């Protein structure tokens, strides 16, 4: 019996699509990767990494738990930027032999499941009103200031998903209370959101606290999504070691969660 316990968005739950924000619970990995792990940090030696076979079995467990097992899982080589990878029906998933370098994926193909990996950065899932166009976004602070979420919304509109009726869910990530940054990062947010933005507030000494979730919600609203279609989930990855991996809390030696979404199956 599966003991996978993902987190779901009530707003996306009203759309005809399937989605999940994974927790670290219900997998087969061990040690620092216990237990539902989907990736390895680059900071550790190869012999200390979670085997690819474990990660593949964890993927199967998650997709089975949300009714999407058997579909092609689409991932990208995440680089903390603003590139959106578009996956269309009848076309190759990636142009080259390696995963495309990007931080967002959109599709209108119901045979595919989109996934991004996180361990403090914000996962954002998007769906059209009919569930036929979906997207997923990896939004760290660099991606937020570069507008990755807005770019994903634009690409979904190009696939026939009107922005005014898009729904978005901002999943578990590091909270403003835990996300302390230096003056350079704070300055980047003030450039994008204004010098008096509520998303940056004073921390200790010369540090600042940045609200990733609030920043992304504002960008979604600026892009044309209505307030009732923007779901901000309350969880903090850094503050809940039982449920979530956290790059910052665990000083880089930790696993990865995923956010997954799939459009409706033609029937």
Image (spheres, helix red, strand yellow):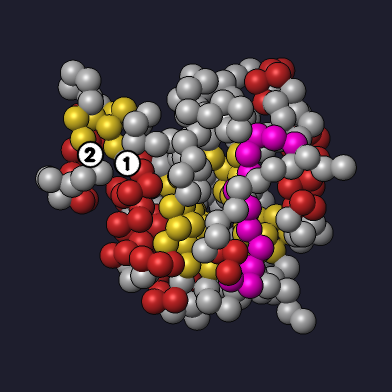
Residue 57 visible from this viewpoint: yes
Label 1 near label 2: C-beta < 8 Å?
Answer: yes
How far is the residue under mark 2 from the one under mark 1?
A: 7 Å
Q: Dot 1, how many residues are within 10 Å of its Cα: few (below 14), some (14-19), or many (20+)?
A: many
Relative to 163, 137 lies left or right: right
Q: Nearer the viewer, residue 98 or 216?
A: 216
Instruction: Kindly state the secondary structure of the residue where label 2 is placed.
Output: strand
Give x and y (percent) for residue 155: 45, 69
- Quadrant containing the N terminus in the rendered view: top right
The circle drawn on residue 211 is 1
Give x and y (percent) for residue 222: 28, 65
Residue 58 visible from this viewpoint: no
The circle drawn on residue 200 is 2
Q: Dot 2, how many residues are within 10 Å of its Cα: few (below 14), some (14-19), or many (20+)?
A: many
Q: Residue at x 27, y 32 (%)?
A: 209
> In which image quadrant can residue 224 be found?
bottom left
Whether 24 is among the magenta residues is yes
When the figure is inspected, residue 211 is found, relative to residue 229, above or below; the finding is above
Q: Which residues are magenta?
A: 15-26
Give x and y (percent) for residue 10: 55, 60
Q: Residue at x 58, y 69 (%)?
A: 14
Instruction: Kindly state the secondary structure of the residue where label 1 is placed.
Output: loop
């Amino acid at each position: 019996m599966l003991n996978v316990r993902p987190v779901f968005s009530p707003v996306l739950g009203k759309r005809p699509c399937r989605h999940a924000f994974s927790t670290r619970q219900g997998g087969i990995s061990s040690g620092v990767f216990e237990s539902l792990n989907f990736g390895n940090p680059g900071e550790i030696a190869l012999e200390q990494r979670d085997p690819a076979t474990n990660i593949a079995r964890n993927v199967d467990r998650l997709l089975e738990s949300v009714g999407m097992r058997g579909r092609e899982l689409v991932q990208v080589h995440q680089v903390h930027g603003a590139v959106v990878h578009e996956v269309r029906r009848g076309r190759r998933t990636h142009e080259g032999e390696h995963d495309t370098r990007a931080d967002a994926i959109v599709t209108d193909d119901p045979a595919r499941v989109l996934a991004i990996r996180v361990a403090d950065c914000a996962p954002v899932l998007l769906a059209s009103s009919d569930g036929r166009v979906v997207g997923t976004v990896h939004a760290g602070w660099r991606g937020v200031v570069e507008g990755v979420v807005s770019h994903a919304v634009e690409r979904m509109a190009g696939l026939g998903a009107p922005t005014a009726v898009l729904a978005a869910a901002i999943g578990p990530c590091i909270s403003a209370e835990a996300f302390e940054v230096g003056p350079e990062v704070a300055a980047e947010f003030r450039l994008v959101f204004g010098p008096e933005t509520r998303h940056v507030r004073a921390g200790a000494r010369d540090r600042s606290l940045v609200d990733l979730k609030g920043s992304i919600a504002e960008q979604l609203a600026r892009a044309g999504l209505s307030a009732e279609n923007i779901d901000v989930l309350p969880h903090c990855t850094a503050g809940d070691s039982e449920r979530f991996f956290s790059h910052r809390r665990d000083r880089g030696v930790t696993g990865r969660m995923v956010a997954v979404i799939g459009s409706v199956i033609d029937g």
